[in-house]
Image (cartoon, rainbow, N blue to C red):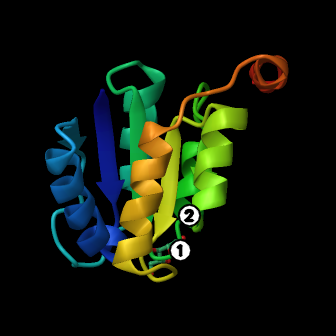
Amino acid sequence: MQIALGSDHGGYQLKEEIKKLLTEMDLKYSDYGTKSTESVDYPDFAIQVAEAVAKGEAERGILVCGTGIGMSIVANKVKGVRAALCHDLFSAQATREHNDSNVLALGERVVGRGLALEIVKVWLNTDFEGGRHQRRVDKIKEIE
Ligand code: RB5
C-alpha cells in the first residue's frame, strides 16, 4: 500500500513520527512536505495529498495540521476523496468500515503521539465492510 503524507508546521512533528511508524509497518510512503516547523499554509499540502489519492498515485493519504480540521476541509473538496478527521480509535475503525475513507486527518495539537500512532495503525489495518455502506458511499459519489 502506497501512502501519501502531508502536514503544515503544526503537524510536522507528528508527520515525522508517522513516517517512522510506516517504515516499521513495512509500508511505502511519499512525503509531500512540509519539511520543517516554519510557518506554511495547510491548503498547499492538503491539495497535493488529496490529488495523489484521487489520481490513484497513492491508495491512502494521511494529513496532519494543528487541529486536523483545515486539512480535512481542503481534502474533502477533491472529487473521490473521503477524508476523516479522527481523534479516537472507534472513529478510526468505523470510518474505514462504514465510509471507506481514503484520507485520515489528524491534529497534532489535539492528541498525544501515542494515541495518534494507534489511530494510524487502526485506520490502515481496517477494511471497508461494503454491503449497505457501499450504497451510502455510492450516494456520496453521486453528489460529487
Ligand atoms: C496553524 O496555526 C493551524 O491553523 C493549522 O495547523 C490547522 O490547525 C488548521 O486547521
Identify the residue at image location x=55%, y=29%: 127
Mark 1 neighbour class, 10 Å CA radius: few under 14, some 14 to 19, many 20 or more: some
Residue 80's image quarter? top right
Asked if disc 2 and disc 1 are in contact, CB closer than 8 Å, the reply is yes
Q: In this figure, which residue is indicated by the disc labeled 2?
A: 70
Q: Is the residue 75 above or below the residue 106 in the image?
A: above
The response on whether ligand 1 sits within 8 Å of label 1 is yes
Q: Mark 2 or 1, which is nearer the eye? A: 1
Residue 14 appearing in the image: yes
Identify the residue at image location x=44%, y=72%: 115
**Residue 67 bears which disc, if any?**
1
Q: Amino acid at mark 2?
A: Gly
Q: Amino acid at mark 1?
A: Thr
Of residue 24 and residue 108, the one placed in the foreground of this image is 24
Identify the residue at image location x=31%, y=47%: 5
Of residue 137 and residue 45, the one placed in the foreground of this image is 137
